[in-house]
Amino acid sequence: MTAAEEREPLVRLERDGAIALVTIDHPPVNALSHAVRSALASMLQEVQANGGFAAAVIACAGRTFVAGADIREFDQPLRTPHLSEICDAIEASAKPIVVAVHGTALGGGCEIALAAHGRVLAEGAVLGLPEVKLGLIPGAGGTQRLPRLIEAHLALDLITSGRHLPAVRARELGLADDVVSAADLLNKAKALALALRSRGLRRASASPVTVSDRGGFAASAAKAAARARGQMSIAAAVEAIAGTLDASFEDGLRRERELFLQLRGSDQSKALRHLFFAERDAGRVEGLRGVAPRAVSTVGVVGAGTMGAGIAGACLAAKFQVRIVDLDTSALGRGRERARRILERETASGRLPPEEAAALLSTLVATNDMTALSKADFVIEAVFEDYDLKAGLLARLAKIAKPSAVLATNTSYLDVNGLAAACGRPRDVIGLHFFAPPETMKLAELVRARDSAPDAVATGLQLARRLGKIPVVVEVCDGFLGNRIFAMYRREMEYALEDGALPEEIDAAMEAHGFAMGPFAVADLSGLDIAWARRKRLAATRAPGERYVGVADELCEAGRFGRKAGAGWYAYRNGQREPDPFVTALVEKHSASRGIVRRPVSMEEIQRRARAAIVNEAAKVLAEGIAARPSDIDVAFVHGYGYPSWRGGPLYEADRVGLDRLLEDAERLHAANGIGFEPAGLLVELVDEGLGFADWPKLQRP
């Protein structure tokens, strides 16, 4: 038992007239540990046995309702009472049981709410069954009760995506009986509990599955299964929910439990649990303990292009005051329209009321006047990736921005140390590398420059989190953590291209591995011109004799910059990518010009070469201190580069595959490619010591 669990009581039972008020009090998030489950089961039994109680309300102390299970217990043997037993007892109760939900009711917390006879939610509360993100499915009736309370296709989407359902949307769907202010939450829940004595109890298990269109449900199920890309939990969720259409509630529960237990011990679930803790570790940054961030209420953005407008829209949705500056009036108009569409999506999802979205948009200042940024607390420049342009802009901003403002450069590759020094206010400067599209991509690389003040870094972290990002703090090098590693991956894939593969074959191999997109599809989406500018910038420093594939340069010279130009590595027709004979001919020409006899390159070879290139460069990044820990690299690649989350990230997967095998593959790459592919010293050391990346701290010297 933990120290937190030793304090009493974890669950309180209090009398309020005829109401039994059951309060879970297990900070910080009221996780359903074994001790909490045991106490809750006892309290529910007492409610049933005590004739003085006519009804019950389940609520939580602190900042949230039950936010899920205690994930630390997933590696321990199962112990009774199981949550499924508690949910069954709640639903079977002869006395009305109502939940009063504030904050988040996720996973097991949501399953408790589904088992109750009534649900009252505080404004801003959310429900969700995100178990698929941990390689699981709901195991206490969630897959069976939710489709009986809302339309089955909506239940399918919520469970297979793990999305949260805002309170207002829950009420619209009939899942919430009422949405009230936090101050009224308990009183409304008590009133509903008493009212249900005469109304009768609605038990989800006794309700029919709500499916108005079986064909539409089947299409949704097929779409969800395709989205899984090898993730077993999504496929299992589809099976469990689809089973509700024809199986009894009891049979459905049995199958749900079987699937849950199979997944609980799976490698995929262990990998996703690793990632869960890795995301939280990423926020623990050396040197920031006790450092207070600067206050931020107004954010300025320079540049109304794709990145700038997306950042501005994300800041608006996070309820910052936003000022966006661009010399191009038409770009400002487009930027404002994009910000409006971002807020519109927030409204459609139920996360933002329409009137609040309209009010936020009305506060957006879009102007040509740079001095409008003089009152901003945090300024992000998002202009074109050109060092001189950014350096000059930051120097100008340093004179305009107030002394307490943080200045952030949204750069993918450039030297943030140099940019910070050039602006004259190096302590106020950080890098904040957003990924496209910035309003939806979860990763934000926070680049800590040599002279960045700790409170400037802390402020960047706080802002990124408020935008819903997962920030990873990195040090300065060309490409930082993600793009530096990705560049070696892409380079190796270009070698495979020259050896005999085609873009569509390489992309298919990596997508079969579980990537959201292959490297050439990603390049087209990002825009080939950005990487082209970097290659030209680095051309003078390229090592003599380095193997260089110039196909991408020729594509750019032909104006094929990717999706935005309608052509890149692929041709794009009606928004769909298609293999292009022009590219095939260009690749074959390059192979011939280098005297390479093209050969078939198997899917397995492509995947092994890609993995070796990624892991080898990641080991160098780690050894150089660019990343603070191996798990930061896993987080960055999953959330920024589409690495399959169910593999846990490249370094977690490397430990599972075996570093000795990875080192052999890296040595083969070096023998074939030469300069730049030297096996990482850290990788060699780990293999020699019989260790994995998980053991990396053992190699740290005092």
Image (cartoon, rainbow, N blue to C red):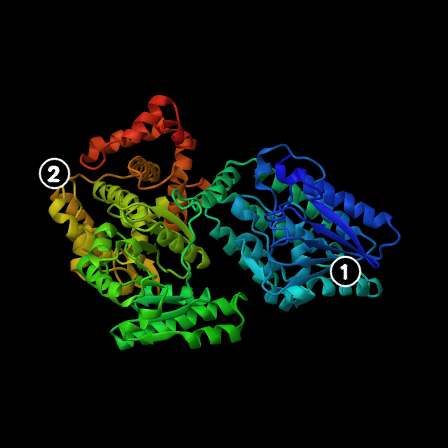
**Count of picture labels:** 2
Placement of 636 over or under 667, stated as above or below: below
Q: Amino acid at mark 1?
A: Arg
Residue 202 is labelled as: 1
Q: From the image, which quarter does the N terminus lie in?
A: top right
Give the residue at x 34% y 75%.
Answer: 366
Residue 190 picture location, percent across and down = 76, 62
Residue 678 picture location, percent across and down = 23, 32
| Secondary structure of residue under mark 1 | loop
Q: Amino acid at mark 2?
A: Gly
Question: Of the residues under marks 2 and 1, which one precedes in the sequence?
Answer: 1
The residue at the far right in this view is: 51
Q: Residues within 10 Å of mark 1 (few under 14, many from 20)?
A: some
Tell me if I can see residue 602 in this picture.
no
Is 318 placed left or right of 482 in the picture? right
Q: Residues within 10 Å of mark 2 (few under 14, many from 20)?
A: few
3D distance between C-alphas at marks 2 and 1: 74 Å
Residue 59 picture location, percent across and down = 70, 55
| Secondary structure of residue under mark 2 | loop
Viewer-proximal residue among 98 and 594? 98
Tell me if I can see residue 156 in this picture.
yes
Give the residue at x 40% y 51%.
Answer: 471
* Quarter where residue 682 is shown: top left
Is 593 placed left or right of 120 in the picture? left
Viewer-proximal residue among 535 and 254? 535
Residue 342 is labelled as: none
Viewer-proximal residue among 73 and 498? 73
Placement of 383 over or under 653, stated as above or below: below
Q: Which residue is mark 2?
A: 545
Give the residue at x 54% y 53%.
Answer: 162
Placement of 604 over or under 445, stated as above or below: above
Viewer-proximal residue among 702 and 554? 702
